[in-house]
Image (tube, rainbow, N blue to C red):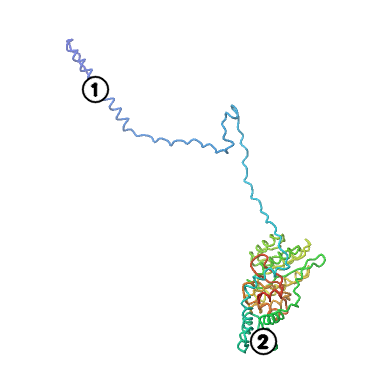
Amino acid sequence: MVVCVTMPDDLENWHVVEGYLAVIVIVAVVALLAAGGLFLLFRPRRKAPPPVKPPEAPILPEEERRPAAEEGEGATTTLPPPVKPAEPAVVVPEIEVPPPSAGRMVRLRSRLARSQSSLGRGLLDLLSRDRLDDEVWDEIEESLITADVGVSPTRIMVEELRTKVKVLGSRTSQEVRGLLREQLLAQVNPDLDRTLRVQKHGERPAVVLIVGVNGTGKTTTTGKLARSLVGDGKKVVLGAADTFRAAAADQLQTWGERVGADTVRGPEGGDPASVAFDATAKGIEEKADVVIVDTAGRLHTKTGLMDELGKVKRVIEKKATVDEVLLVLDATTGQNGMRQAQVFAEVVNITGIALTKLDGTAKGGIVISVQRELGVPVKLVGLGEGPDDLAPFDPEVFVDAILGD
């Protein structure tokens, strides 16, 4: 901005000009300041950069959080190397000491009596009637057949009872009980050899083969038998030859660990005969007394599987003698169990019966029928779900439990 000022000739008018100049200067300065303020107000602004976070200090264990003054001026702290977490310790199960097998059935008699008393009580009530006509004898016969005694043994028992009742004439309750006990005991046949063959042959162990269909309790029976033998002071090796069911090998190994018995197992779906052979070899190597081989549950109608069972037995016999072939039967299956037993007997020459679930059924007559049909004794009975509820079969205890005290 250019301002032209013409100097006046007289001095008086000069003072007026100075006043004008002063006003003009002030206005110019105010205008400049106003323009600068507007520029600052409306100029584009740059975005401020985000604040930089300071690095976080590492979290130290409690013992390392000490001020520098405690360690001395200018001291350098050396941190220890990181400690790896300790691996969990392998828990070794405590080995149990099972009770001996002797006297087990006597101890479990009350449990057996609770399930079988209905059979004995019904028979005693019928035989104690004042008049025994054909109708009563038909009821007695029906009670025995319903209890799975079998048709042929039932007819023999009824004929014997009818003859002796006629000879006695009047009968007291004790005489009736004695008659029935005599007949039941005769049918159970106390003269059969029920000894479990588990004695070593020099340096070679005895071998027990466990067979049966699905669901009868073979693996559980194998484990309980191992407990019973360990309780009798024997060294046992288990063979998990049920390779079709992985849970069976795990279950058997658990049974073995509880009593200190080694378990030989193979890959899932492997050759059962190979596992049985290896178990027998380990039994010889460890100088065991008994090797128990658990086999897969086989349907007696499957020819190929039954043939495989025969192969298992033949392979074992390359290393040792198969002393016992125990067929595990479910007492609740009744006469169907009889058909199973007959087919298994044809394949592997059954030497004894292990009858399970005898405590939960009033059909204990299967003891009589299976022995009569096969000529094979019942050697073991399962009288509960506890680990020590497998007992050597005692005919007299069994009959007394049926009849009650």
In the picture, the quarter occupied by the N terminus is top left
Q: Return the residue at label 2.
A: 170
x and y, in percent, of residue 80 in the image:
62, 38
What crowding class fits label 2: few (fewer than 14 Cα within 10 Å), some (14-19), or many (20 or more)?
few
The C terminus lies in which quarter of the figure? Answer: bottom right
Q: Nearer the viewer, residue 244 or 284?
A: 284
Q: Amino acid at mark 1?
A: Val
- From the top left corner, tell me how far across and down residue 79 is, in percent: 61, 36
Which image quadrant is residue 402 in? bottom right
Viewer-side residue, 113 vs 270: 113
Residue 93 sits in which quadrant? bottom right
Residue 375 position, x and y percent, is: 73, 79
Nearest the viewer among 39 and 382 is 382
Task: Report the side of 4 relative to 59 (left or right).
Answer: left
Mark linked to residue 58: none
**Which badge, 1 or 2, comes first in the chain's sequence?**
1
Q: Nearer the viewer, residue 178 or 77?
A: 178
- Disc 1 secondary structure class: helix
Q: Which mark is residue 27?
A: 1
Question: In the rendered view, would you say 340 is above or below 271?
Answer: below
Q: Amino acid at mark 2?
A: Ser
Residue 175 image position (x, y, % from top left): 68, 82
Camera-near label (1 vs 2) is 2
Q: From the viewer's perspective, is residue 368 above or below residue 322?
A: below
Furthest-top residue in this view: 11
Kindly state the secondary structure of the residue where label 2 is placed.
loop
Q: Tell me if I can see residue 278 in this picture.
A: no
